[in-house]
Image (tube, rainbow, N blue to C red):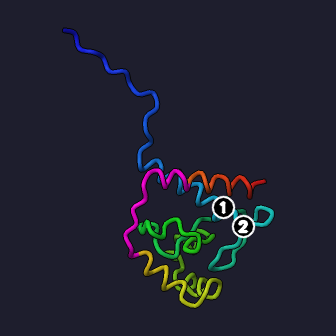
Amino acid sequence: MAKEKKIPNKRKKPSRKSIVTKLDAVFSQYIRLRNAKGGIATCYTCGKKDHWKKLQNGHFMSRRHYSTRWDETNCQVQCYGCNIGMQGNQYIFGLKLNADHGECTSEELMHQSRQIKKFTDAELLEMIEHYKKLVNKLNG
């Protein structure tokens, strides 16, 4: 008896890594656009103004913590100097978070970052769609 050939699946399921990469990209766009006026955004920690495309999505608690990786309070616009050169300029970042969002915000984010959060692929895909809509709205 001849072996039956398997028909390859034309639509390959996206890998977890590719889903996370897409979410990171659209979330970063949203963070950088949400406070931009006329395409110009301001670094959260030093006040430098530049076009939103030249700035970065800075995290108060590192991206390695999935529980806060896509938290809108944890993420703010930062220039390259603050985000990379000063490793997030975390002390100033924390002071500003507390001033803008309440006295214990930085401590709450630190606590939240230590919690284990496992997102399903479906949850991540839903977040991609949510932030795509927000980015499209901001781009007008």
Quadrant of the image occupied by residue 48: bottom right
Quadrant of the image occupied by residue 139: bottom right
Q: Residues within 10 Å of mark 2 (few under 14, many from 20)?
A: some
Q: Give the x, y percent position of residue 62.
A: 46, 71
Tag 1 and tag 2, C-beta contact below 8 Å: yes
Magenta span:
114-127
Residue under the image location 45 percent in, 27 percent down:
10
Mark-to-mark CA distance, 1 and 2: 7 Å
From the viewer's perspective, is 138 left or right of 88?
Answer: right
Q: Give the x, y percent position of residue 64.
A: 41, 66
Check residue 109 in the rendering and tell me which mark sits there, or answer none.
none
Element marked by disc 1: helix
Residue under the image location 63 percent in, 70 percent down:
77
Residue at the farthest left position:
1
Comparing 1 with 69, the one in front is 1
Comparing 45 with 116, the one in front is 116
Q: In this figure, which residue is indicated by the disc labeled 1?
A: 54
Q: In this figure, which residue is indicated by the disc labeled 2?
A: 50
**Amino acid of disc 2:** Asp
Q: Is residue 84 magenta?
A: no
